[in-house]
Amino acid sequence: MTALKIPQHVAIIMDGNGRWAEQHGLPRIEGHRKGTQAVEHILKAAEDFGVKNITLFAFSVENWNRPKLEVAALMQLLDSFLKEQEEQLVKRGMRLRVLGRTSELPTSTQKLLRKTEQATQAFDKLTVGLALNYGSRTEVVDAVKAITRDTQEGRLDLNELDYDVFRQYLYTKEMPDPDLIIRTSGECRLSNFLLLQSAYSEIYLSDVLWPDFDQAEFGAALKAYASRERRFGKTAQQLTS
């Protein structure tokens, strides 16, 4: 296990909960509920493999367009998950970081997120990024607004603005860019997820629906990552010389 080249940061588009529920003749919310169990398995797998950062795409800015009853059920499920997981995160030395426009989430959810972030802020064994009400385009807009404010108020000189400075205004500023992005359920798109940060990420597509994505599937993704040559614009010859 430790012989693998382990990515510092794995980001996952957790897709397929609804289809899993349909395949099993269950309401869609049961697919989401089963998906939270998969989250627990993958956090354990990330811990075992020695991954230092993992980001989970839990709810996008576009997901508000889903049926209102489903959205309400998802928020209730999120609240329950946070209540259940806070103790485990503390016990295992994991830090929670929330990524997205959290001010637009229900008040009860915001309070639980702040509480869990504060309870885990001192830990560094594994940083868990939870992308909620997240969209890469809105992230860039929020970053530009913040840069504009800092420029107008004299805290930033635009002549010094480069990507390293710009990334300090992104939601993921405290995490390295993802080395590996995993998408489950066989879909082949990034869906407005970490578009800037994934410029040089390796992408792994799995046909497995998220509720069935387990430690073995996670290990297969890491193995595939370890077999790839990451050149970052260089030639293969440059890397070996």
Image (spheres, rainbow, N blue to C red):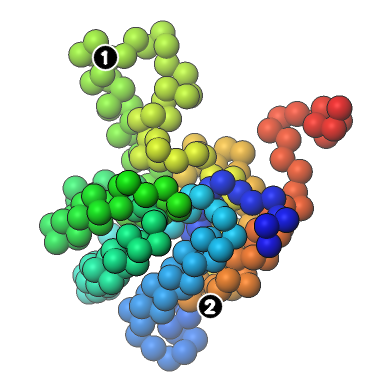
Q: Residue at x 51, y 50 (%)?
A: 52
Position above or below: 135 against 220: above
Residue topped by disc 1? 155
- Element assignment for label 1: loop
Q: Residue at x 47, y 24 (%)?
A: 164
Where is residue 72? Give x, y as percent.
21, 70
Residues under numbered marks 1 and 2 in contact, where contact means CB atoms less than 8 Å apart: no
**The N terminus: image quadrant:** bottom right
Position above or below: 99 against 113: above
- Snapshot quadrant of residue 28: bottom left
Position above or below: 31 against 124: below
Instruction: Confirm whether residue 70 shows in the render.
Output: yes
- Element assignment for label 2: helix
Where is residue 126? Give x, y as percent.
45, 53
* Camera-nearest residue between 198 and 82: 82
**Label 1, label 2: how many angstroms apart (C-alpha)?**
48 Å
Q: Is residue 76 left or right of residue 16?
A: left
Residue topped by disc 2? 212
